[in-house]
Amino acid sequence: MVKTTNKLYAELSEEIKHLARTRNAVIIAHNYERPEVQDVADFVGDSLGLSREAAKTKADVIVFCGVHFMAETAAVLSPQKTVLLPDLAAGCSLAATIDAEQLRGWKDEHPGAVVVSYVNTTAEVKAEAIRGGMKSQRMSGIEKLIAGITTVEEVLRVSVAD
Protein backbone atom coordinates (compact mmCIF):
# COMPACT_ATOMS: atom_id res chain seq x y z
CA MET A 1 0.00 0.00 0.00
CA VAL A 2 1.20 3.50 -0.78
CA LYS A 3 1.65 5.52 2.38
CA THR A 4 -0.74 8.42 2.50
CA THR A 5 -1.05 11.28 4.90
CA ASN A 6 -4.24 11.78 6.86
CA LYS A 7 -4.97 14.88 4.80
CA LEU A 8 -4.54 13.05 1.47
CA TYR A 9 -6.61 10.14 2.75
CA ALA A 10 -9.41 12.52 3.76
CA GLU A 11 -9.27 14.27 0.37
CA LEU A 12 -9.42 10.99 -1.56
CA SER A 13 -12.28 9.74 0.59
CA GLU A 14 -14.26 12.93 0.05
CA GLU A 15 -13.61 12.84 -3.70
CA ILE A 16 -14.88 9.25 -3.92
CA LYS A 17 -18.00 10.11 -1.90
CA HIS A 18 -18.60 13.20 -4.05
CA LEU A 19 -18.30 11.18 -7.28
CA ALA A 20 -20.75 8.62 -5.92
CA ARG A 21 -23.28 11.33 -5.07
CA THR A 22 -22.99 13.02 -8.48
CA ARG A 23 -23.54 9.67 -10.25
CA ASN A 24 -26.36 8.60 -7.91
CA ALA A 25 -24.28 5.61 -6.83
CA VAL A 26 -24.31 3.61 -3.65
CA ILE A 27 -20.98 2.15 -2.51
CA ILE A 28 -21.20 -1.16 -0.69
CA ALA A 29 -18.26 -3.03 0.78
CA HIS A 30 -17.98 -6.58 2.04
CA ASN A 31 -16.78 -7.15 5.61
CA TYR A 32 -13.52 -8.56 4.22
CA GLU A 33 -12.58 -5.36 2.39
CA ARG A 34 -9.78 -3.16 3.64
CA PRO A 35 -10.71 -0.49 6.22
CA GLU A 36 -9.95 2.26 3.69
CA VAL A 37 -12.60 0.83 1.36
CA GLN A 38 -15.11 0.31 4.16
CA ASP A 39 -14.64 3.93 5.28
CA VAL A 40 -16.04 5.30 2.00
CA ALA A 41 -18.86 2.76 1.75
CA ASP A 42 -22.50 3.58 2.38
CA PHE A 43 -23.05 0.03 3.64
CA VAL A 44 -20.66 -2.60 5.01
CA GLY A 45 -21.75 -6.18 5.64
CA ASP A 46 -22.12 -9.68 4.25
CA SER A 47 -22.68 -10.36 0.56
CA LEU A 48 -26.41 -11.09 0.50
CA GLY A 49 -27.25 -8.41 3.04
CA LEU A 50 -25.38 -5.83 0.99
CA SER A 51 -27.20 -6.79 -2.20
CA ARG A 52 -30.52 -6.46 -0.40
CA GLU A 53 -29.58 -3.05 1.03
CA ALA A 54 -28.46 -1.80 -2.37
CA ALA A 55 -31.74 -2.97 -3.93
CA LYS A 56 -33.68 -0.84 -1.42
CA THR A 57 -31.86 2.36 -2.34
CA LYS A 58 -32.87 4.85 -5.01
CA ALA A 59 -29.36 4.69 -6.46
CA ASP A 60 -28.97 4.11 -10.19
CA VAL A 61 -25.52 2.59 -9.75
CA ILE A 62 -24.23 0.01 -7.27
CA VAL A 63 -20.48 -0.01 -6.70
CA PHE A 64 -19.90 -3.42 -5.14
CA CYS A 65 -16.54 -3.69 -3.38
CA GLY A 66 -16.41 -7.45 -3.18
CA VAL A 67 -16.08 -10.40 -5.54
CA HIS A 68 -17.83 -11.51 -8.74
CA PHE A 69 -20.64 -13.61 -7.25
CA MET A 70 -21.55 -10.75 -4.91
CA ALA A 71 -21.87 -8.27 -7.77
CA GLU A 72 -23.89 -10.84 -9.73
CA THR A 73 -26.29 -11.23 -6.81
CA ALA A 74 -26.73 -7.46 -6.64
CA ALA A 75 -27.46 -7.40 -10.37
CA VAL A 76 -30.08 -10.15 -10.03
CA LEU A 77 -31.81 -8.29 -7.17
CA SER A 78 -31.55 -4.92 -8.95
CA PRO A 79 -31.85 -5.57 -12.70
CA GLN A 80 -32.70 -1.93 -13.41
CA LYS A 81 -29.45 -0.72 -11.84
CA THR A 82 -25.91 -0.69 -13.16
CA VAL A 83 -23.60 -2.78 -11.00
CA LEU A 84 -19.89 -2.01 -11.02
CA LEU A 85 -17.18 -4.26 -9.62
CA PRO A 86 -14.09 -2.09 -9.05
CA ASP A 87 -11.66 -5.02 -9.04
CA LEU A 88 -12.44 -7.30 -11.98
CA ALA A 89 -9.83 -9.77 -10.76
CA ALA A 90 -11.65 -10.20 -7.43
CA GLY A 91 -12.69 -13.81 -7.47
CA CYS A 92 -13.82 -16.22 -4.80
CA SER A 93 -12.27 -19.63 -4.36
CA LEU A 94 -15.53 -20.87 -2.86
CA ALA A 95 -17.59 -19.82 -5.88
CA ALA A 96 -14.99 -21.37 -8.17
CA THR A 97 -15.51 -24.85 -6.73
CA ILE A 98 -18.27 -25.67 -9.25
CA ASP A 99 -19.47 -24.27 -12.55
CA ALA A 100 -22.79 -24.71 -14.36
CA GLU A 101 -21.48 -27.48 -16.62
CA GLN A 102 -20.28 -29.49 -13.63
CA LEU A 103 -23.62 -28.97 -11.90
CA ARG A 104 -25.51 -30.16 -15.00
CA GLY A 105 -23.42 -33.34 -15.00
CA TRP A 106 -24.06 -33.87 -11.31
CA LYS A 107 -27.79 -33.37 -11.78
CA ASP A 108 -27.77 -35.87 -14.67
CA GLU A 109 -26.21 -38.43 -12.34
CA HIS A 110 -28.90 -37.76 -9.71
CA PRO A 111 -32.23 -37.21 -11.52
CA GLY A 112 -35.04 -36.07 -9.25
CA ALA A 113 -32.72 -34.64 -6.61
CA VAL A 114 -33.24 -31.10 -5.31
CA VAL A 115 -30.22 -28.80 -5.61
CA VAL A 116 -29.41 -26.66 -2.59
CA SER A 117 -26.93 -23.92 -3.35
CA TYR A 118 -25.13 -21.56 -1.03
CA VAL A 119 -25.29 -17.87 -1.82
CA ASN A 120 -21.56 -17.96 -2.64
CA THR A 121 -22.07 -19.55 -6.04
CA THR A 122 -22.03 -17.80 -9.38
CA ALA A 123 -25.21 -16.55 -11.04
CA GLU A 124 -24.69 -19.20 -13.74
CA VAL A 125 -24.69 -21.98 -11.13
CA LYS A 126 -27.73 -20.49 -9.38
CA ALA A 127 -29.58 -20.31 -12.73
CA GLU A 128 -28.76 -23.95 -13.48
CA ALA A 129 -29.83 -24.99 -10.00
CA ILE A 130 -33.15 -23.14 -10.31
CA ARG A 131 -34.07 -25.29 -13.30
CA GLY A 132 -34.54 -28.15 -10.87
CA GLY A 133 -36.26 -26.36 -8.02
CA MET A 134 -33.12 -25.11 -6.31
CA LYS A 135 -33.06 -23.54 -2.89
CA SER A 136 -30.41 -20.93 -2.10
CA GLN A 137 -29.33 -20.19 1.42
CA ARG A 138 -26.62 -18.64 3.52
CA MET A 139 -24.26 -21.12 5.09
CA SER A 140 -25.67 -20.38 8.57
CA GLY A 141 -29.13 -21.66 7.62
CA ILE A 142 -28.32 -24.45 5.20
CA GLU A 143 -28.71 -27.42 7.56
CA LYS A 144 -32.15 -26.23 8.68
CA LEU A 145 -33.18 -25.75 5.05
CA ILE A 146 -32.01 -29.22 4.07
CA ALA A 147 -33.77 -30.78 7.06
CA GLY A 148 -37.00 -29.16 5.90
CA ILE A 149 -36.89 -30.74 2.43
CA THR A 150 -39.06 -33.82 2.88
CA THR A 151 -40.66 -34.34 -0.53
CA VAL A 152 -37.60 -35.74 -2.29
CA GLU A 153 -35.25 -38.57 -1.56
CA GLU A 154 -31.99 -36.85 -2.48
CA VAL A 155 -30.56 -33.37 -1.94
CA LEU A 156 -27.51 -32.18 -3.90
CA ARG A 157 -25.59 -29.65 -1.83
CA VAL A 158 -23.60 -27.17 -3.87
CA SER A 159 -21.19 -26.12 -1.17
CA VAL A 160 -17.59 -25.82 -0.21
CA ALA A 161 -18.03 -28.09 2.78
CA ASP A 162 -18.67 -31.21 0.70
Image (cartoon, rainbow, N blue to C red):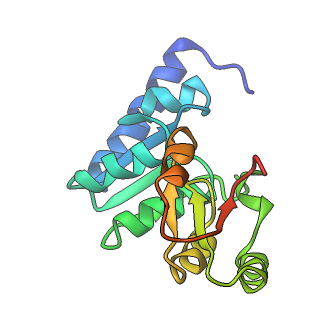
Q: Position of residue 6 (x, y in %)?
A: 53, 13
Compared with 50, 79 (above or below) is below
Report the residue that reaches farthest toward the top. Answer: 6
- Taking the spot 61% from the left edge, 82% from the top edge, the residue there is 112
Compared with 2, 156 (above or below) is below
State whether residue 84 appears in this view. no
- Taking the spot 39% from the left edge, 31% from the top edge, the residue there is 14
Compared with 131, 33 (above or below) is above
Q: Nearer the viewer, residue 99 or 40?
A: 99
Q: Position of residue 161 (x, y in %)?
A: 76, 46
Q: Position of residue 73 (x, y in %)?
A: 48, 61
Residue 34 lies in quadrant: top right
- Taking the spot 46% from the left edge, 54% from the top edge, the residue there is 148
Count up the numbered dots: 0
Report the residue that reaches farthest toward the left. Answer: 58
Q: Nearer the viewer, residue 17 or 119?
A: 119
Residue 85 in the figure: left or right of residue 50: right
State whether residue 50 appears in this view. yes
Q: Nearer the viewer, residue 40 or 47?
A: 47
Residue 47 in the figure: left or right of residue 113: left
- Taking the spot 72% from the left edge, 51% from the top edge, the residue there is 92
Q: Nearer the viewer, residue 149 or 31?
A: 149
Image quadrant occupied by the N terminus: top right
Compared with 131, 35 (above or below) is above
